[in-house]
Amino acid sequence: VVAIILVVAAIKSSKPKRDPNIDMIGNSVIADLDLNRVDTVIVAGAASTTTIERGEHGWTIKEKHGYPADFEKVRANVIELAELKVADVIDLPPAEHARLGIGEPSAERDAKKITLKGGGNVLGALILGKEHTKQSAAAEGYGGYPDGRYLMPAGGDHVFRVAKALTSYSDKPIDWVDTDLLNVSRSDLEALAITGA
């Protein structure tokens, strides 16, 4: 009996321990994000910040004095964040996060922080780091191409790689403006007023 117990114990102890990071792969980066609650999107960079708010006049840009934002762009980007899945977990100590561009945006670090709010509460926040580049299999001399990005949930402990490059999250307000409003038919134009300070 003692021999059997020792054999069973030896077998159990010899089994490789499961890596807890593997369990995170395939999970949503922002867990349980309710898209219908999102009423504010903030994109902060080293040089500027863009705040896009949903109100009685639709989605507007705070830094542009309430000028309408491009609804389709806002919608597509928020959905993209909600659908982001963890492709890989990067096991690095915090001191090495800067190597992947992970950290608060600053003059030394070209990172972006995206915050989604609803009713004044933070529903999710991500820090976007460097792009992940896939090396080309073509002839030598050709570079790689971005096929993902490193990021970390704000206040989180793990750096993730996702399979999307996330290139459309500009911190410049002008990049979110609804340009269709500037297309006025010549026949509809009756007067033009230009006012200064």
Image (cartoon, helix red, strand yellow):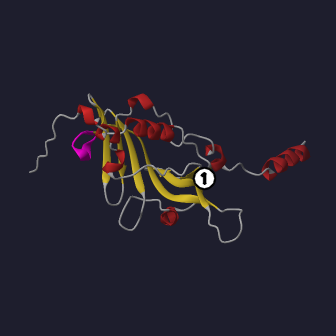
Give the position of the N terminus as an image quadrant: top right
Q: Residue at x 40, y 48 (%)?
A: 114
Residue pictured at 32% horizontal, 41% vertical:
52
In the rendered image of this protein, does residue 125 appear above or below residue 99? above
Residue sticking out furthest to the front = 187
Residue name at image x 17 percent, y 34 percent: 190
Could you tell me residue 30's position as x and y percent?
49, 40
SS at badge 1: strand
**Visible in this render: residue 178?**
no
Q: Is residue 30 left or right of residue 15?
A: left
Quarter where residue 69 is shown: top left
**Residue 182 sits in quarter:** top left
Visible residue check, residue 127 = yes
- Whether residue 108 appears in magenta in the rendering, the answer is no
Looking at the picture, does residue 130 appear above or below residue 57? below
Q: Quadrant of residue 143?
A: bottom right
User: Three-letter amino acid code at disc 1?
Assistant: Val
User: In the image, which residues are magenta?
Assistant: 61-67
State the image coordinates of residue 195 (x, y, percent, origin top left). 11, 46
Question: Is residue 142 or residue 150 the one in the foreground?
Answer: 142
Along the line of sight, the residue nearer the viewer: 137 or 87: 137
Could you tell me residue 106's position as x and y percent?
36, 63
Residue 64 among those drawn in magenta: yes
Q: Residue at x 71, y 64 (%)?
A: 138
Total marks shown come to 1
Query: Residue 52 versus residue 93: which sits nearer the camera?
Result: 52
The residue identified by callout 1 is 89
Callout 1: 10 Å neighbours few (<14), some, many (20+)?
Answer: some
Residue 158 in picture, x, y percent from top left? 53, 52
Position of 30 compared to 19: left or right? left
